[in-house]
Image (spheres, helix red, strand yellow):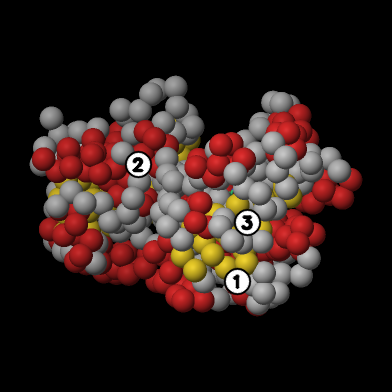
């Protein structure tokens, strides 16, 4: 039985996961993307991005006839109840959000709506600054010749998916946020989310509120990380292990232990971009968000803490050989967007160090950036051979393995807490951690 018909514009990780999961729950889904190659891949059951569990789910639902992908908006929007806009929102040079893809998707949806005689709810899922979704109304009305609220609906429905566990997160959310233009629009979306456990709160709010919830949530998580990184930097000065402090404060139920892992700073396609976009947005509204500015500034500096630790361990880095383990912005992905590893490699090259790198998944992407300026190793063992020190930047499971760490005789510069300092001491490692003292 088909529950509802859904279209998803944009087949990045948010769009693909959203569409595939809705199909898996029994809805009929059409992906619309301007990239013909992506469309072809989806129709063959090959997801253009890697996300655990996604390929099996995509293949399963293609074979049940619940999924199709197309470049044609009119075909993709035929008979649909809801269309999700999941296109990218890159940053402008000043950190503000660039909405050109969201606007052009709205224009194409509006054009296609002209020939569709149904109450379609247009729903923005891309992360957009408050006011964006409503700013699409004139575009949608002009291109379609129809009226928002009466002829078509409008919603904003943010996502809270983490890369690497996006399918799981989509199916088990802490909350479902529905920002609605009017009740009729929100009711359609609530019906689509009916299969989820009734205990999961459905929050029906205004469109602007939904947009703000997404930014506030990411900004708070980023703030937690910058906060614990600041504490780590202080801990280092006084010989205290930041993990003991984080553990203790995390036991307070008002705080929670999560996102208190001191590190070389946060990376990825979301936190750095979203914090900067929120800062630029606040400024545009005549408010100077000093706390967020420092969250961002500390995060920009934090990767270089690893360089300082290396200097402490081996002195000047000029002509020294450095092994780098972990390039992706976090484990289980090949994504290197805003990865702290990139900043660290650049600085090491400026300091005229010789750099060798290894990552289980992200090598190809890094090669595209650094070419022959650095050496690429086929294994972690190869990467620590004949080097003066090793940086561990990403906590891939294989780098946290004690059997492996025991073999590392050179100084280890730990950027994410791969081993407890007391244990490193017991094993006789030459260990230097961010806020982690032997
Ligand atoms: C993040 C949020 O966690 C998701 O809820 C959100 O939906 C998503 O952004 C988004 O806006 O689309 P993601 O970027 O996939 O998800 O990755 P995270 O697991 O949150 O990690 C981000 C960065 O923070 C990584 O570089 C990680 O190493 C770092 N981090 C995380 C720390 O340094 N310390 C921590 O305690 C936690």
Asked if the residue under mark 1 is in contact with the one under mark 2, i.e. CB atoms within 8 Å, the reply is no
Q: For mark 1, what is the residue?
A: 354
x%, y% of residue 355? 57, 68
Mark 3–mark 1 distance (CA, rounded to whole Å)? 12 Å
Q: Of the residues under marks 2 and 3, which one precedes in the sequence? A: 2
Mark 1 neighbour class, 10 Å CA radius: few under 14, some 14 to 19, many 20 or more: many
Does 108 sit above or below residue 371?
above
Total number of numbered labels?
A: 3
Quadrant housing the N terminus: top left
The reply to whether the residue tagged 1 has its Cβ within 8 angstroms of ligand 1 is no
Q: Of the residues under marks 3 and 1, which one precedes in the sequence? A: 1
Q: Nearer the viewer, mark 2 or mark 1?
A: 1
Q: For mark 2, what is the residue?
A: 52
Q: Of the residues under marks 2 and 1, which one precedes in the sequence? A: 2
x%, y% of residue 140? 31, 64
Mark 2–mark 3 distance (CA, rounded to whole Å)? 29 Å
Q: Is residue 73 visible?
A: no
x%, y% of residue 178? 43, 41
x%, y% of residue 270? 51, 55
Q: For mark 3, what is the residue?
A: 390
Residue at 32% x, 29% y is 194
Q: Where on the picture, by quarter, is residue 167?
A: top left
**Does dot 2 land on a helix, a strand or a loop?**
loop
Does 326 sit above or below residue 35?
above
Q: Is residue 250 visible?
A: yes
**Does dot 1 land on a helix, a strand or a loop?**
strand
């Amino acid at each position: 039985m088909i529950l509802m018909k859904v279209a998803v514009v944009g087949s990045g990780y948010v769009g693909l996961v959203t569409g595939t999961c809705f199909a898996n729950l029994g809805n009929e889904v059409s992906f619309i993307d301007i990239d013909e190659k992506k469309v072809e891949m989806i129709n063959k059951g090959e997801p253009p991005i890697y996300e655990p569990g996604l390929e099996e789910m995509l293949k399963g639902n293609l074979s049940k006839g619940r999924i199709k992908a197309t470049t044609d908006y009119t075909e993709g929007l035929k008979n649909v109840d809801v269309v999700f806009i999941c296109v990218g929102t890159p940053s402008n040079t000043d950190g503000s959000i660039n909405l050109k893809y969201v606007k052009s998707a709205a224009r194409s949806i509006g054009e296609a709506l002209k020939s569709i005689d149904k109450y379609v709810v247009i729903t923005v899922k891309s992360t957009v600054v408050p006011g964006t979704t409503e700013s699409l109304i004139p575009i949608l009305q002009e291109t379609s010749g129809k009226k928002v609220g009466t002829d078509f609906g409008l919603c904003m429905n943010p996502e809270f998916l983490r890369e690497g566990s996006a399918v799981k997160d989509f199916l088990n959310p802490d909350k479902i946020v529905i920002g609605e233009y009017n009740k009729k629009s929100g009711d359609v979306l609530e019906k689509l989310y009916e299969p989820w456990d009734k205990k999961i709160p459905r929050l029906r709010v205004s469109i602007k509120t939904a947009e703000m919830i997404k930014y506030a949530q990411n900004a708070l998580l980023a703030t937690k990380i910058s906060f614990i990184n600041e504490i780590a930097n202080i801990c280092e000065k006084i010989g205290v292990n930041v993990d003991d402090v984080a553990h203790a404060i995390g036991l307070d139920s008002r705080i929670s232990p999560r996102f208190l892992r001191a590190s070389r700073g946060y990376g990825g396609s979301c936190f750095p971009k979203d914090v900067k976009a929120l800062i630029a947005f606040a400024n545009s509204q005549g408010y100077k968000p000093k706390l967020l500015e420092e969250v961002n500034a500390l995060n920009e500096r934090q990767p270089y803490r690893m360089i300082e630790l290396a200097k402490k361990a081996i002195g000047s880095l000029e002509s020294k050989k450095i092994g780098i383990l972990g390039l992706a912005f976090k484990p289980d992905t090949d994504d290197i967007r805003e990865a702290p590893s990139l900043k660290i490699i650049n600085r090491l090259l400026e300091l005229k160090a010789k750099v060798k790198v290894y990552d289980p998944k992200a090598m190809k992407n890094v090669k595209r950036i650094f070419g022959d300026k650095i050496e690429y190793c086929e294994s972690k063992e190869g990467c620590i051979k004949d080097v003066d020190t090793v940086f561990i930047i990403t906590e891939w499971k294989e780098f946290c393995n004690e059997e492996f760490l025991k073999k590392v005789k050179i100084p280890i510069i730990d950027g994410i807490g791969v081993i407890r300092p007391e244990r490193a001491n017991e094993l006789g490692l030459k260990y230097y951690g961010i806020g982690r003292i032997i």
